[in-house]
Image: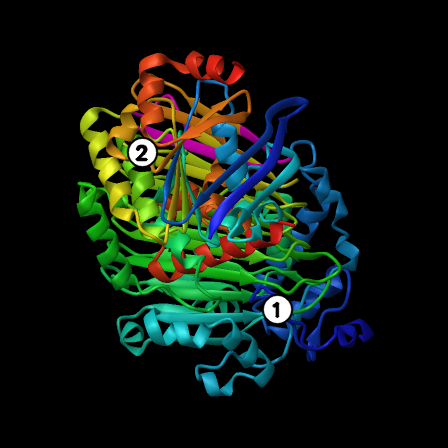
């Protein structure tokens, strides 16, 4: 049981961004992707989740054997894929409680209604764990949120939707150290043999809190090196150029 | 009339209002509009001579007035007044008992949920089928307090001493071409009188149903709230989807005497062939309040600018409106606030949504003359565009003379971005659900102004519209 990406090629317009990428991350593991700016990390996250601006010109992505590229973004989500956005969008006038509720409702068979009492009970429990104020439920989705609040909100949504696979795109960006801890603990609580994580980050700092099983280095639209968590530390110390030199050598 | 029988039997589509029953009208004024049509209508209704004369005068004014296409949409030219049927009725008095309503009408209104709503939360109901009311009922406790809630025919016949004084005074026949048309051929609509000091705690509701093709519905509503009284009136409108043009042209006049409060709530869900050209205005006397809460969904073209003339000191006027223009539809709506006394206050909040090739226009008029003191107006119009083909225009005309007033005007245009939709899709919502949620979010603060039952209905209507707009 895994997400398997093979020989993936993606363009934006005529510009190749991902150039034959191979990656597998199974349930039960946390894989991290590190890489310099412009390496194609965020593009990869968006392609996995089904953003229509990116043109897949070759390769395959499957989730537990199912072809993801054949599915719309919303179908992928309902099949168990979650993405925590680097820049979560605002939805003016729609409260957080209503938004998450609509997302859960979308997973039920037609005609079945979400149990409101059970829903709020669960929502409040997850919010408490993330140290979120109750007032949060009545605020519009991400509107006027600080960077930290937005990221907590992403983790809250993930906790409520309980995906099989989660892609976290630069979840650490814009977080102070306290918020980073809360968010990381939120992710760690969800680690389970039934769930796979792909953590995309620019900095090693996040991986002190979310300790990965495997670290991949991405550069120029490809995975150029994979290893265990010590690879992240080495990168931190020696910079990305070191991997490049190593690979070239 | 063979065309009358030609309408096919029950025709159900996804939307609740889109079904019709075969017609069997005992009274039919035929196609086209002449002096004979007027005499026919007046005769069937057994009207007093002054009403017949009022109608004939109105017809002349209607003929003399040009179409307002110099400022309004050229689409108006598509209305062929010679092909419209002006009066269709089953020739029976509206019943007070639900059981006595003819079966096909009963079924229609039951499918629209009318009797259920009446039991649940309404103080009175009138249900109009084509030209005449089929059912009207007001709770006994209100009748005892002297509240009158009848259709226009009955109002003019039974209570001329109350209604004649104000009938056609708030909106003169010559106000515009369509108010003249309505004055010539009006039928149905509600006449309400609330005696001094009576506060009607539950809403009164009217339901307007067009069931016949090529038909014009011209209801006439007059609500008078005497000193210190209060009422909330709600109207809902639907029609099945016909191939040809249907015309709905109502005139609604409100009178709020000293310290009185009137709230007038409209939720219309017309099918895409209906021309909806409505004149609505209220007069607010000293310290009185008139609020128009208006939701326009559907129709081919809606032109509607509810107004309040603030005639007495400290009178207040408010228009809160939501308009949704889908592909091929034009919502041309707005508000008129005429300040005619010191310390009068008006508030206009308008939100429009344009989807696909839909078009929304806001026209506002605020008038504060020089000799007055201490008047206030606030106008906000926000437009939401969904996809790049939709169009929105704002024509605010704020005339403020003198320097002892406070006015403010804000307008905004926003768009549902693809990234916003993607964010919602990533959480499992379909494109239609995502758009629906965005639209509901946009109008959320206004929807709260509607009574609960209506806000639920409104949300459902928006969902249906958005569902239909995504391929």
Q: Residues within 10 Å of mark 1 (few under 14, many from 20)?
A: many
Q: Which residue is mark 2?
A: A150
Label 1 lies in what chain? B
Secondary structure mainly formed by the magenta segment: strand
The image shows residue B419 at horizontal and vertical percentages of 50, 34
Front in this rendered view, residue B379 or B439:
B439
Instruction: Specify the quadrant that holds the N terminus of chain B.
Output: bottom right
Q: In the rendered structure, does residue A222 fall within the stretch colored magenta?
A: no
Residue A69 versus residue A22: which sits nearer the camera? A22
Residue at 25 percent across and 36 percent down: it is A183
Q: Name the residue furthest front.
A: A249
Judge depth for marks 2 and 1 and give the one in front.
2
Q: Which residue is mark 1?
A: B130
- Residue B376: say if magenta: yes
Above-or-below relation of B120 to B334:
below
Q: Position of residue B142 (x, y in %)?
A: 29, 72
**Left or right of B194: which side holds B175?**
right
Whole-angstrom CA distance, mark 2 to mark 1, is: 53 Å
Question: Relative to residue B243, is residue A141 depicted above or below?
Answer: above
């Amino acid at each position: 049981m895994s997400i398997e990406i093979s020989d993936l090629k993606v363009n934006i317009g005529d510009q190749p961004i991902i150039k034959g990428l191979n990656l597998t991350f199974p349930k039960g593991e946390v894989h991290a992707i590190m890489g310099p700016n412009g390496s194609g990390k965020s593009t990869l996250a968006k392609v996995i989740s089904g953003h229509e601006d990116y043109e897949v010109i070759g390769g395959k992505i499957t989730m537990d054997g199912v072809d993801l590229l054949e599915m719309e973004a919303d179908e992928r989500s309902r099949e168990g894929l979650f993405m925590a956005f680097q820049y979560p969008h605002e939805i003016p006038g729609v409260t957080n409680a209503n938004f998450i509720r609509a997302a859960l409702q979308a997973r039920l068979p037609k005609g079945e209604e979400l149990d409101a009492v059970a829903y709020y009970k669960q929502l409040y429990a997850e919010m408490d764990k993330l140290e979120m104020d109750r007032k949060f439920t009545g605020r519009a989705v991400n509107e006027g949120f600080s960077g930290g609040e937005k990221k907590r909100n992403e983790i809250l949504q993930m906790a409520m939707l309980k995906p099989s696979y989660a892609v976290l795109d630069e979840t650490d960006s814009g977080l102070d150290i306290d918020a980073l801890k809360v968010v990381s603990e939120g992710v760690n609580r969800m680690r389970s043999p039934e769930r796979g994580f792909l953590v995309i980050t620019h900095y090693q700092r996040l991986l002190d809190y979310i300790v990965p099983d495997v670290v991949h280095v991405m550069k120029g639209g490809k995975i150029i090196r994979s290893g265990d968590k010590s690879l992240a530390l080495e990168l931190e110390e020696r910079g990305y150029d070191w991997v490049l030199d190593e690979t070239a050598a | 009339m063979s065309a009358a029988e030609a309408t096919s039997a029950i025709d159900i589509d996804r939307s609740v209002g889109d079904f019709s029953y075969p017609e069997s009208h005992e009274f039919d004024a035929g196609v086209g509009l002449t002096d004979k049509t007027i005499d026919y209508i007046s005769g069937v209704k057994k009207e007093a001579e002054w009403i017949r004369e009022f109608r004939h005068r109105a017809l002349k004014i209607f003929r003399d007035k040009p179409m307002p296409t110099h400022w309004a949409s050229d689409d108006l030219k598509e209305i062929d007044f010679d092909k419209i049927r002006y009066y269709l009725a089953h020739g029976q008095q509206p019943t007070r008992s639900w059981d006595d309503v003819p079966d096909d009408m009963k079924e229609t209104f039951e499918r629209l949920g009318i009797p259920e709503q009446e039991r649940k939360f309404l103080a009175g109901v009138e249900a109009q089928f084509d030209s005449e009311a089929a059912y009207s009922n007001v709770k006994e406790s209100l009748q005892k307090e002297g509240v009158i809630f009848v259709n226009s025919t009955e109002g003019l016949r039974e209570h001329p001493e109350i209604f004649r004084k104000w009938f056609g005074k708030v909106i003169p026949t010559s106000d515009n071409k369509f108010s003249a048309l309505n004055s010539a051929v009006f039928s149905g609509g509600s006449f309400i009188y609330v005696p001094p000091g009576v506060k009607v705690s539950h809403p009164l509701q009217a339901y307007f149903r067009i069931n016949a093709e090529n038909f014009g519905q011209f209801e006439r509503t007059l609500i008078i709230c005497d000193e210190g009284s209060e009422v909330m009136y709600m109207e809902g409108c639907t029609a099945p989807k016909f191939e040809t043009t249907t015309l709905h042209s109502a005139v609604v006049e409100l009178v709020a005497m000293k310290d009185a409060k009137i709230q007038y709530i409209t939720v219309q869900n017309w099918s895409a062939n209906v021309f909806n050209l409505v004149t609505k205005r209220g007069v607010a006397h000293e310290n009185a309040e008139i609020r128009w809460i208006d939701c326009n969904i559907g129709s081919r073209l809606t032109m509607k600018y509810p107004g309040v003339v603030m005639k007495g000191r400290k009178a207040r006027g408010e228009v809160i409106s939501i308009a949704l223009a889908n592909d091929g539809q034009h919502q041309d709506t707005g508000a008129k606030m005429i300040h005619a006394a010191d310390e009068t206050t008006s508030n206009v909040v308008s939100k429009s949504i344009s989807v696909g090739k839909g078009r929304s226009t806001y026209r506002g008029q605020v008038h504060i003359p020089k000799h007055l003191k201490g008047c206030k107006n606030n106008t906000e119009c926000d437009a939401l565009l969904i996809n790049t083909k939709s169009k929105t225009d704002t024509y605010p005309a704020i005339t403020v003379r003198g320097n002892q007033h406070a006015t403010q005007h804000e307008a905004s245009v926003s768009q549902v971005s693809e990234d916003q939709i993607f964010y919602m899709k990533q959480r499992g919502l379909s494109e239609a659900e995502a758009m629906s949620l965005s639209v509901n979010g946009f109008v959320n603060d206004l929807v709260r102004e509607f009574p609960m039952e209506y806000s639920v209905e409104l949300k459902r209507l928006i969902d249906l519209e958005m569902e239909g707009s995504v391929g």
